[in-house]
């Protein structure tokens, strides 16, 4: 007996718990520059409109979970248990977050949006996001399932969202051309990744001896160490890729700095070789390099500076960060799949 059948039966919930919390955290991170007043004008408009990226990711997860209801009409009954049922509270918080975020996104297209109203809406959305992630974490802390009632189970899901969320946010910031600190977001993801790995190691030790009358965790998940190692490999690779992808502004700054340092090195030779009797020529030679960096700077300011692989800097950054985020989400998906493989109830049922 293995737990693969349990996990495949709950594959929509695997997708939901992988995508929705990470998308919600990414939305929160992308909203901070506007909410704190650091992004204004066109920059704020780009950030507001591109929050559709984490919003869509969270919505995909929520739609996937809705298919678990079997009959869509059952969704109406879910809201009757908000406050009493952890699962109903989870769905209620998700709907609150998505509704507020959808209203805010539509309002971001207004010709003259009110900054105070925007910041107030963002504050409400961020509160809903925190409530949603916490509600999802505790919705699967079930007393009748001995493998899910462990104290580190909610912590593992919160840490999952802190691994995937910052990497998704980095993609959004690159698309919006907002110069965010890679060190801060990759550092947050890396710290959550290390803590998440420790949690999975401890959970593995706690889960191994658990059993009921029909099966043991070792039978349900015969290769737990291999799954955990896959999570480590995929998530670490995703964080590393996101770290290596500098945004367009940083790439342009590095390119212009390199040209400024290399250009004067060749000019003194040209000046030194010029005849002493013609003073007008050194003036012409000296004036030429001053215009070249200006033209190059003007070109790179438009985002046309090529990256190492020939792609424009901003496009290269978006592609690499997207791959990094996908790798991290794949690692999270693996361990969420393992979570549903360990469905081991109290008593005879499995």
Image: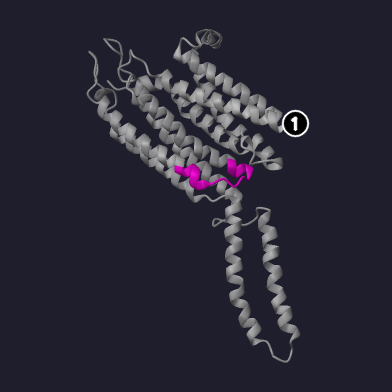
When asked about the image quadrant of residue 257, the answer is bottom right
Residue at 53% over, 9% down = 74
In the image, residue 299 sits, relative to residue 206, either above or below, namely below
Residue at 33% over, 12% down = 144
Residue 103 in the image, given as x and y percentages of width and height: 66, 24
Q: In this view of the protein, which residue sits in the foreground, 323 or 107?
A: 107
In the image, residue 71 sits, relative to residue 173, either above or below, namely above
For the N terminus, the image quarter is top left
For the C terminus, the image quarter is top left
Q: Is residue 4 visible in this depiction of the protein?
A: no
Q: How is the image coloured?
A: one colour
Residue at 52% over, 49% down = 245
In the image, residue 292 sits, relative to residue 250, either above or below, namely below
Taking 115 as reference, is 340 left or right?
A: left
Residue at 36% over, 20% down = 5
When asked about the image quadrant of residue 149, the answer is top left
Question: Which SS type dominates the magenta stretch?
Answer: helix
Circle 1 SS class: loop
Residue furthest to the right in view is: 111
Residue 330 in the image, given as x and y percentages of width and height: 44, 35
**Residue for badge 1:** 110
Taking 118 as reference, is 10 left or right?
A: left
Residue 289 in the image, given as x and y percentages of width and height: 68, 72
Residue furthest to the bottom in view is: 277
Taking 223 as reference, is 257 left or right?
A: right
- Specify the segment rendered in magenta: 173-187
Q: In this view of the protein, which residue sits in the foreground, 95 or 112?
A: 112
């Amino acid at each position: 007996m293995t737990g693969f059948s349990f996990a495949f039966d709950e594959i929509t919930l695997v997708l939901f718990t992988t995508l929705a919390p990470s998308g919600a955290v990414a939305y929160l991170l992308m909203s901070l520059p506007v909410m704190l007043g650091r992004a204004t004008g066109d920059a704020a408009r780009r950030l507001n409109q591109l929050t559709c990226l984490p919003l869509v990711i969270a919505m995909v997860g929520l739609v996937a979970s809705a298919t678990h209801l079997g009959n869509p009409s059952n969704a109406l009954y879910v809201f009757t248990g908000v406050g009493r049922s952890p699962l109903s509270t989870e769905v209620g918080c998700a709907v609150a977050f998505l509704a507020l975020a959808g209203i805010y996104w539509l309002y971001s297209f207004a010709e003259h949006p009110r900054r105070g109203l925007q910041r107030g809406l963002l504050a409400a959305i961020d509160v809903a996001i925190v409530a949603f992630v916490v509600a999802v974490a505790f919705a699967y802390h079930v007393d009748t399932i001995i493998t899910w009632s462990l104290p580190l189970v909610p912590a593992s899901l919160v840490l999952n969202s802190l691994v995937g969320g910052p990497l998704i946010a980095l993609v959004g910031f690159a698309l919006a051309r907002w110069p965010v600190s890679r060190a801060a977001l990759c550092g947050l993801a890396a710290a959550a990744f290390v803590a998440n790995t420790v949690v999975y190691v401890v959970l593995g030790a706690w889960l191994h001896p658990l059993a009921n009358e029909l099966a043991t965790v070792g039978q349900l998940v015969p290769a737990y160490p291999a799954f955990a190692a896959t999570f480590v490999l995929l998530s670490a690779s995703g964080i590393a890729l996101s770290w290596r992808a500098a945004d367009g502004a940083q790439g342009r700054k590095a390119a212009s700095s390199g040209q400024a340092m290399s250009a004067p090195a060749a000019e003194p030779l040209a000046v030194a070789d010029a005849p002493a009797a013609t003073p007008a020529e050194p003036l012409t030679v000296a004036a030429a390099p001053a215009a070249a960096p200006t033209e190059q700077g003007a070109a790179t300011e438009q985002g046309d500076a090529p990256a190492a692989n020939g792609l424009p800097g901003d496009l290269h950054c978006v592609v690499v960060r997207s791959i990094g985020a996908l790798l991290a989400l794949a690692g999270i998906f693996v361990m969420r799949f393992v979570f549903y493989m360990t469905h081991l109830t109290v008593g005879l049922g499995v």
